Image (cartoon, rainbow, N blue to C red):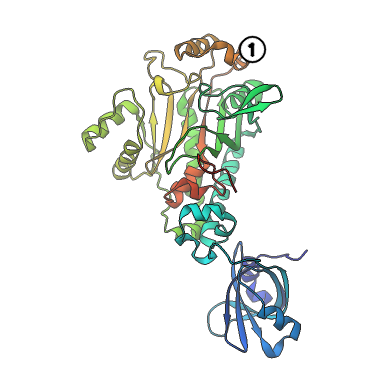
């Protein structure tokens, strides 16, 4: 194997390895030629290290390879680790060079300045753009969030599940789904793992989670929507109310806020603040109260019984930041008319539901609530939504043989990443975004 250690690992053991032979592998980030000495900055996923090639100390073959070296060549370099004489830290005095690959044409993007290019160009050449250390940090942070999700819910007795992404019907209403030809039938790409999360709870797993792609055939052209994204989903049985679900969601975000110091270097690179959550808990405000706050505080009127628009979410984010010193707020009891048929309605106010959204710095990043687990009530809900019962027959079957009270939530991984780092467009948080115009690379 060419590579056995990352640059970060070599530097971390610098004092122990000083004077020892090391091998580092990666991409040539910069080249500086001073005649008798050539300096190469080598980059890998974890950092950069300066390598010094000195003419009088190298074989002619190595010198020739160094002369032909170009930025973004993929190389391995053997040499001795030493303290850099003109600055703090370590460098490598090269003894040999292995060139594994060279660019065959001029780069369409300069890696170290790729952020100056337009987003469309960056996404067109994403494999080069992602080599920019600042860009790659987005996806290291995203991976960290997914790992913390697994850690937290596993610690709470949840079981990871893996649900189908080819389904027989849409989760919401059958609209806004991507149809696919499935042998001699029409099937759809899953809008959500919702039905199968509930299936798993009813099947006896009780508490489950999943990280997986979801697909929405919505022709949005906004900075906050994608047609394919990764959802962090949970479902939990034997709840007393939807507040139990919010407790589990809050627990995860508290873990992010507590452990965020593990990725402080990424936050610093983006000048992003830590996550603020009050000791008293994330505020939980009924949407009817939100209507009043928005109108009295900001003159923003939302029609009674409607969902919040993006401007309303931002204003509410400002309100809770000032009043509660919180980056997060639960908006609860959403109107039935804007929630899917499986949401549990309030017995005394059936036009409102036991459901919630979680806003993070003024953007909805989580949707959840208590599900209707009573068979006859589910059938009524379908009829009230104007949906055909026969199209959801396989789903209704789950509830005929004993279903515990349950609820859950779906969290947008890209949106959480976007809000932590303060990105301006959700496409930046997706390595290969899919939207109405983009299906390659």
Q: Residue at x 47, y 60 (%)?
A: 115
Query: Is residue 59 something that shows in the picture?
Result: no
Q: Quadrant of residue 82?
A: bottom right
In the picture as drawn, the residue positioned furthest to the front comes out as 105
Q: Nearer the viewer, residue 223 or 241?
A: 223
Q: Residue at x 54, y 28 (%)?
A: 177
Count of marks, rendered view: 1
Describe residue 370's horizontal placement relative to residue 146 as left or right: left
**Residue 353, image x, y percentages:** 41, 21
> Where does the N terminus fall, quadrant-wise?
bottom right
Describe residue 329's horizontal placement relative to residue 381 as left or right: left
**Residue 47, image x, y percentages:** 58, 66
Relative to 211, is 136 above or below? below
Q: Nearer the viewer, residue 209 or 77?
A: 77
**Residue 202, image x, y percentages:** 62, 20
Q: Secondary structure at mark 1?
A: loop
Residue carrying label 1 = 401
**Residue 65, image x, y percentages:** 71, 78
Mark 1 surroundings: few (<14), some (14-19) or many (≥20) residues within 10 A:
few
Relative to 441, is 97 above or below? below
């Amino acid at each position: 194997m060419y590579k056995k250690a990352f640059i970060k690992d070599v530097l971390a053991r610098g004092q122990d390895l000083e004077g020892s032979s090391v091998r580092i592998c990666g991409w040539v980030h910069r080249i500086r030629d001073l005649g008798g000495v050539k300096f190469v900055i080598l980059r890998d996923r974890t950092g950069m290290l300066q390598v010094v090639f000195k003419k009088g100390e190298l074989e002619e073959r190595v010198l020739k390879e160094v002369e032909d070296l170009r930025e973004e060549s993929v190389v391995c370099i053997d040499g001795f680790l030493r303290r850099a004489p003109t600055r703090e830290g370590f460098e490598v005095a090269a003894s040999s060079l292995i060139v594994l690959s060279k660019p065959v044409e001029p780069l369409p993007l300069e890696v170290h300045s790729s952020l100056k290019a337009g987003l469309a160009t960056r996404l067109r050449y994403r494999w080069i753009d992602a080599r920019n250390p600042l860009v790659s940090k987005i996806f290291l942070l995203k991976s960290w969030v997914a790992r913390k999700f697994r850690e937290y819910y596993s610690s709470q007795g949840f079981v990871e599940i893996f649900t189908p992404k080819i389904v027989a019907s849409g989760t919401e209403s059958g609209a806004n789904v991507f149809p696919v030809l499935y042998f001699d039938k029409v099937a759809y790409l899953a809008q959500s793992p919702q039905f199968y999360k509930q299936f798993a709870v009813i099947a006896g797993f009780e508490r489950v989670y999943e990280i997986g792609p979801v697909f929405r055939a919505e022709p949005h052209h906004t900075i906050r929507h994608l047609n394919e994204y990764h959802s962090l989903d949970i479902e939990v049985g034997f709840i007393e109310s939807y507040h139990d679900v919010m407790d589990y969601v809050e627990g995860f975000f508290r873990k992010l806020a507590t452990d965020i110091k593990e990725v402080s270097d990424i936050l610093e690179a983006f000048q992003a603040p830590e996550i603020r959550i009050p000791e008293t808990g994330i505020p939980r405000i009924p949407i009817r109260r939100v209507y009043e706050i928005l109108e009295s505080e900001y003159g923003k009127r939302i029609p009674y019984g409607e969902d919040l628009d993006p401007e309303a979410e931002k204003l509410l984010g400002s309100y809770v930041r000032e009043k509660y010193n919180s980056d997060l707020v639960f908006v609860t009891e959403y109107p039935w008319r804007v929630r899917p048929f499986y949401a549990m309605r309030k017995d005394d106010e059936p036009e409102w539901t036991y459901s919630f959204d979680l806003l993070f710095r003024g953007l909805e990043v989580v949707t959840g609530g208590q599900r209707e687990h009573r068979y006859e009530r589910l059938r009524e809900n379908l009829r009230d939504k104007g949906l055909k019962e026969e199209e959801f027959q396989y789903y209704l079957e789950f509830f005929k043989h004993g279903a515990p009270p349950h609820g859950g939530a779906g969290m947008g991984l890209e949106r959480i990443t976007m809000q932590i780092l303060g990105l301006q467009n959700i496409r930046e948080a997706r390595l290969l975004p899919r939207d109405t115009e983009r299906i390659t690379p």
